[in-house]
Image (spheres, rainbow, N blue to C red):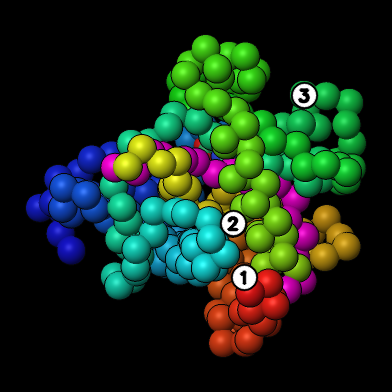
């Protein structure tokens, strides 16, 4: 696929290309960034690894009844997705404390929350992705509770998925958009770039913190996650859970 397609958006690590009136291609580039883009590197195959991880996750979430934009993945590092009207919010879920919540409060890294925290940030690097209050969100025209209800379901499914490969889901960020029927659906990517994963029962990172904090081989960790998720894909575990409910 060449760049003859109209580029709708060039993000820090992904490019969105127009395919049809209703569909886009999302191409994962071989880049990794942190700190609002201040730290940046290129890593061969990183794009295709994250594309494959995102694909497995979106497929699983779809099978669990969580609507998302993913249609299929044919190219090495490209997902075909429904075109959405993207909501400029980053929805962050925290099961344990790490990252900004520890920097901004007195809460210690690793503290487990009884109820997951759901936070909303404005998606605007130039403003530093500021934290929003529910009131501010409402004034911007968004109902926080619609987002929270889908987000909690995503959290439950992701915790379960990563537990199966011996990882604790510490936190993650998701994005949303409205489809052509005006329905709110999950968008963007879900990959170890946008979550924190710790080896079960430890604080050993299998996510972008390896790059943020210069503490090891990022791609080796991402490859391990992909390999483990792909292996799961062939096992009946996840489906048998679903079948029980039916
Ligand atoms: P934080 O600790 O920096 O607030 O991040 C919480 C989670 O959200 C972490 O898994 C990283 C993810 N995240 C993104 O993917 N993109 C972002 O722009 C931000 C701020 C966080
Ligand atoms: N917004 C940050 C970035 O530049 C997020 C992060 O540090 O992960 O990628």
Residue 128 percent across, percent down from the top left: 54, 22
Question: Mark 3 or mark 2: which comes first in sequence?
Answer: 3
Q: In x, y percent, where is residue 196?
A: 69, 51
At x 75%, y 37%, the residue is 117
Q: Residues within 10 Å of mark 2 (few under 14, many from 20)?
A: many
Q: Which image quadrant: the N terminus? A: bottom left
Measured in 3D between alpha carbons, the distance from the residue under mark 3 to the one under mark 2, in whole angstroms, is 23 Å
Could you tell me which secondary element the residue under label 1 belongs to? helix
Of residues 157 and 3, which is closer to you in this image?
157
Q: Which quadrant, please, contains the C terminus? A: bottom right
The residue where tag 2 is placed is 192
Give the Cα distance between marks 1 and 2.
9 Å
Residue holding disc 1? 225
Question: Residue 170 colored magenta?
Answer: yes
First-in-chain label (1 vs 3)? 3
Q: Quadrant of residue 115?
A: top right
Q: Can residue 43 be seen in this view?
A: yes
Give the residue number, with chain letter if any, for mark 3: 104
- Between 153 and 210, the one nearer to me in the picture: 153
Give the distance between the C-alpha atoms of the residues marked 1 and 3, in whole angstroms. Answer: 30 Å
| Horizontal side, residue 85 vs residue 121: left or right | left
**With respect to residue 158, does 38 lie above or below?**
above
Q: Quadrant of residue 192?
A: bottom right
Q: Going by the image, does 4 lie left or right of 92?
A: left
202 or 111, nearer to the observer: 111
The tally of labels here is 3
Q: Does the magenta stretch include residue 33?
A: no
Figure check: 109 above or below 19: above
Instruction: Report the magenta residues as a range.
Output: 164-180
Contact, mark 1 vs mark 2 (Cβ under 8 Å): yes
Left-right relation of 209 to 201:
left
């Amino acid at each position: 696929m060449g760049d003859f397609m109209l580029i709708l958006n060039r993000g820090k690590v992904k490019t969105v290309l127009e395919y049809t009136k209703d569909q886009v291609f999302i191409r994962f580039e071989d880049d990794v960034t942190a700190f609002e883009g201040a730290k940046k590197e290129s890593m061969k195959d990183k794009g295709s690894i994250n594309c494959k991880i995102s694909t497995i996750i979106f497929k699983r979430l779809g099978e669990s009844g969580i609507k998302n934009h993913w249609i299929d993945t044919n190219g090495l590092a490209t997902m075909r997705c429904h075109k959405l009207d993207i909501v400029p919010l980053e929805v962050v879920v925290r099961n344990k404390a790490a990252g900004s919540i520890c920097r901004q409060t007195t809460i210690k890294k690793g503290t487990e929350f009884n109820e997951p925290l759901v936070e909303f940030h404005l998606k605007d690097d130039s403003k530093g992705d500021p934290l929003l209050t529910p009131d501010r969100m409402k004034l911007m025209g968004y109902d926080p509770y619609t987002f929270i209800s889908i987000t909690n379901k995503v959290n439950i499914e992701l915790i379960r998925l990563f537990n199966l490969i011996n990882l604790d889901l510490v936190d993650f960020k998701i994005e949303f958009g409205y489809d052509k029927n005006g329905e709110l659906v999950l968008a963007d990517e879900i990959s170890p770039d946008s979550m924190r994963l710790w080896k079960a029962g430890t604080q050993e990172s299998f996510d972008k913190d390896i790059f943020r904090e210069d503490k090891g081989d990022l791609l080796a960790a991402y490859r391990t996650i992909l390999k483990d998720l792909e292996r799961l894909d062939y096992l009946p575990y996840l489906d048998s859970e679903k079948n029980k409910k039916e």
